[in-house]
Image (cartoon, rainbow, N blue to C red):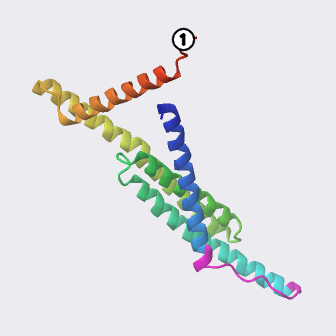
């Protein structure tokens, strides 16, 4: 399998995993915390009571979803350096769940609580983004810098540098094989 096709399948898998996670959370929340039953009778008082209970349910559901999204997003940070495809899919699941939470929040009526839920969703998203992208990149750069300094100072490549070089050689070999397979042959 060529490298570009493999990368496309990895992205596709990550998106699908994210969608499956949000579906799992959504079905789970609706299974264990179902919405209020739709009234079978007509009448303004019955409809008003239903609307109030629906708004409370939507707000409570959005809070539950924010908690679930936060847990999912934090889980995506675990072993993200070693399992990037799974980590990306789990992160997408957390993001999709957060979007679902915001949609549920907008269905509620309490504007102060709605604002608080959306604010928490924003803070969690910013924090996870920082931890995943900024801090993770800084940590990888520090490890790479330490490996290069250790290789230069010690005169021999460190284990980290050797592993990175082996991975790079493997990528070049895969690219060469893909290039040879894609070249048109003699007519």
Q: Quadrant of residue 45?
A: bottom right
**Residue 39, magenta (yes or no):** yes
Against 163, residue 40 (above or below) is below
SS category of the residue bearing label 1: loop
Observer-nearest residue: 66 or 162? 162
Count residues near mark 1 (Cα–Cα under 10 Å), then give few for <14, some for 14-19, many for 20+.
few
Q: Is residue 78 left or right of residue 90?
A: left
The number of discs equals 1
Against 66, residue 150 (above or below) is above
Against 139, residue 103 (above or below) is below
Farthest-out residue, top: 187
Magenta stretch secondary structure, dominant: loop
Q: Is residue 101 left or right of residue 42?
A: left
Q: In the rendering, at what x and y percent does residue 35 appear?
A: 68, 78
The region drawn magenta spans 30-44
Q: Residue at x 61, y 72 (%)?
A: 61
Residue, disc 1: 186
Observer-nearest residue: 65 or 163? 163
Q: Residue at x 43, y 54 (%)?
A: 76
């Amino acid at each position: 399998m060529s490298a570009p096709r493999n990368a496309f399948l990895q992205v596709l898998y990550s998106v699908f995993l994210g969608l499956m996670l949000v579906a799992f959370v959504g079905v789970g929340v609706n299974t264990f915390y179902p919405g209020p039953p739709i009234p079978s009778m007509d009448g303004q008082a019955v409809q008003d009571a239903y609307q109030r209970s629906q708004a409370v349910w939507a707000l409570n559901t959005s809070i539950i979803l924010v908690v679930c999204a936060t847990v999912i997003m934090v889980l995506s940070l675990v072993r993200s350096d070693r399992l990037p495809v799974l980590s990306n899919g789990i992160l997408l699941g957390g993001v999709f769940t957060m979007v679902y939470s915001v949609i549920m929040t907008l269905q509620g009526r309490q504007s102060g609580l709605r604002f608080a839920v959306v604010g928490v969703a924003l803070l969690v998203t910013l924090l996870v983004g920082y931890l995943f992208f900024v801090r993770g990149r800084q940590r990888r750069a520090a490890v790479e810098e330490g490996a290069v300094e250790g290789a230069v100072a010690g005169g021999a490549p460190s284990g980290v540098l050797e592993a990175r070089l082996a991975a790079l050689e493997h990528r070049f070999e895969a690219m060469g094989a893909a290039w040879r397979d894609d070249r048109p042959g003699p007519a």
